Each structure stands twice: as structure tokens, then as C-alpha cells.
Image: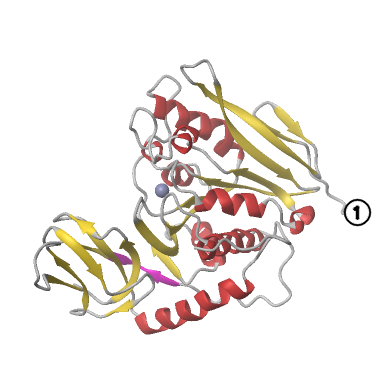
Amino acid sequence: MSASSAKPFELCGQTIKPGSRALIEMPAAQLYTNTPLHIPVHVVHGRQPGPVLLVCAAIHGDELNGVEIIRRLLQFQQLKRLKGTLVAVPVVNVFGFIHKSRYLPDRRDLNRCFPGSEAGSLGSRMAWLFKTEILDNCSHAIDLHTGAINRGNLPQVRANLASDATAEMAHAFGVPVVMNSVLREGTFREVAEEQEVPVITYEAGEALRFEEASIRIGVRGVLNVMRHLKMLPAKRSSSVREPTVAQSSQWVRADKDGSFRPLVGLGARVRRGQSLGFISSPFADDDGIEVIAPCSGILVGRNHLPLVNEGEALFHIARFEEVREVAEHLEEFTSNILEDGPVVDGEPPIVS
Ligand SMILES: [Zn+2]
């Protein structure tokens, strides 16, 4: 036995003994049908002390890959050897989750309501509850997101790299693409950083979908961060290749309304001036207009809906100095993940 053993962990008025697990039903609100609404919070408390890592998903209620990432994560046998504490919240915005919606019933975006307040709007109160009951008890955080409805994101980490501890977590996660992103007001990420909790966002796939590769990359990423924080034993052969950081990115928008025929997929390397797709009238027999890449880079986001209005975002291009290296890294990384990505024993993969 190690000399130091962990103290009991207190959360939401409950006490979790070292070396045990708990599922806490945190009271969140009451529906107008008198039905109480809870936010389920999993706690895995290690025998030995260490960081308290919060992993949360579905702050946007329709972003589902993270919900599945957490379900799988909690089944990993390695957690028996955990040092410190894992606090996992599969669904933060339970209202939105029920309605398959990004938003709250008052149409607010919960991820613009932080830090919130006790007597504010519905969103403000939920944000405040989550901050004070959960975040304030954690030392590190990973927030899991996807693109919006019909918009796919290449698996990527977004983080404020100006903070050293955050930058280290972003690198440890182990995806090829890291986006240095400023902190938006009212976001969970902003409030966490403000109270010096290093926090990264993992973005992968699109809303209302499960995507196997995005899920596996996410599970592996969280486990990698836990190893980096010494919450789990290091791998014997740690061959995590360093990610490349994009300092800027650019949206390509539709110059006209019509039906949209994309020519490049997520992860593609694009060159400035390259044709990325066409927009034409669904009723005319011409080719329509070409969508041209305004810069070189890697495609990190894409609209999957073939009907577009002028001004709508079609492509998101991340800019790098070393575009070719990133493209090669991505190709290798993507082909490996479906072969040797982490899986829960006995569970077949989700097929899209
Ligand atoms: Zn989101």
C-alpha cells in the first residue's frame, strides 16, 4: 500500500469513499409537470490522491458523441488504478437533451450563460448550479462538443494555449489538430480558466449523431490526458505524436443560394484557389458557381446539408505553416483509430 491514501470526496452533499464509485442525481430543476429533473454525475474516486478531472458533455443538448465517450470511458478497467478523482457528467443540458435541442427551453445557449447567478434566468441558474456544485470542486476539465446540426467537425482540440497547463493538456489529448482559440464570453471554458482550472474542448462529428471514429478518438484522448496528469499509469510505449497548432482559421461562405455539391471532405488538404465545390440552382441545367478556397489549410469543418442560403458557412479551413505534415499525420492517425482505438471489451463498433 502507498503511504498516502485519498480522503473521502464530497460532492453535492454526498461523501464518496476512496476506491469507490457513485452516481449522484444532482437536482437541477422541476418541469412544469411537477417532474423533478436531475443531472446525473458519475464519480470515480481513487484510493490515492491526485487531480480531480471533470469530463462533461452535452452542454449543447444535441451534441451526443461526448455522451457516448463518457459511457465508454466509465467502463475502462484501468479506472481501478485511478489516482485522484474522475467526475463525469454525460449530459449537462438535460433540458436540451430531452428535446434533442442545442438550447434550453427559453432558447438560450447554456454555453453563453456562465458563470450564471442564483437568481438569474433559467440558463443563468443552471450555469451557476453547475459551476458551484461541480466545477468548483474540480482541478482540471475536458468539455466534449460536436459541430451543430448538419455540420461536421474534424476531431480537434480547442484551447487557450496562453495557459501552460491548458496547452499541456491539449497536446496530451493526442489529436493531430489543435486550434488555439480565444475564450468566448459566457462559456464554460472561460469561467473554468478564470478560476485557474485548465480546460480543453474536444470537438468532433456533428450534432444528433454517433460517430465511431470521433468517439474512439475522444475516449483515447481523455485517457491520454489522465495519463499526462498521472491519474493513470503511463503506457509502456508512449508514441503520441505531437499535434500541430492552428493559430487561425477561416470560414468559406456561400456566395449564392442553391444546391451545394462539395468536392472535399473533412481532413482534406486544400490549396488557395482550389475548387471546393459548386452551388447551382436545383432547377437550372448549368454548373452554377464554383466555391474557391480563399486560403490553404486543412478542412476542419463542413456543411453536410446540400441546400444553402447565401452567407451560410460551407467550409472551415484551419491554417498551418506545415500543411503537408498535418495532412500526412491526419491520414495515418485516422487509419489507425478504427484498427487500434480503445474499445470496451465485447462491444461491437457503431457503423455509420
Ligand atoms: Zn457545442
Element type at mark 1: loop
- In the visual, does 272 lie left or right of 43? left
Please tell me which residue is depicted at 62% across the width and 64% down the height of the picture.
224
User: Tag count in the figure?
Assistant: 1
Please tell me which residue is depicted at 9% across the width and 72% down the height of the picture.
286
Q: Is residue 248 magenta?
A: yes
Q: Which residue is mark 1?
A: 1
Give the residue furthest to the right: 1
In what quadrant of the picture does the N terminus appear? bottom right
Q: Look at the image and tell me whether residue 152 can be seen.
A: yes
- In the visual, does 16 lie left or right of 62? right
Query: Which x, y percent locates residue 247?
Result: 34, 67
Q: Is residue 160 or residue 67 the one in the foreground?
A: 67
What segment carries the magenta color? 244-249
Q: Residues within 10 Å of mark 1 (few under 14, many from 20)?
A: few
Q: Amino acid at mark 1?
A: Met
Query: What's the magenta bit mostly, secondary-structure-wise?
Result: strand
- In the visual, does 264 lie left or right of 71? left
Please tell me which residue is depicted at 87% across the width and 51% down the height of the picture.
3
Query: Which x, y percent locates residue 156?
Result: 44, 63
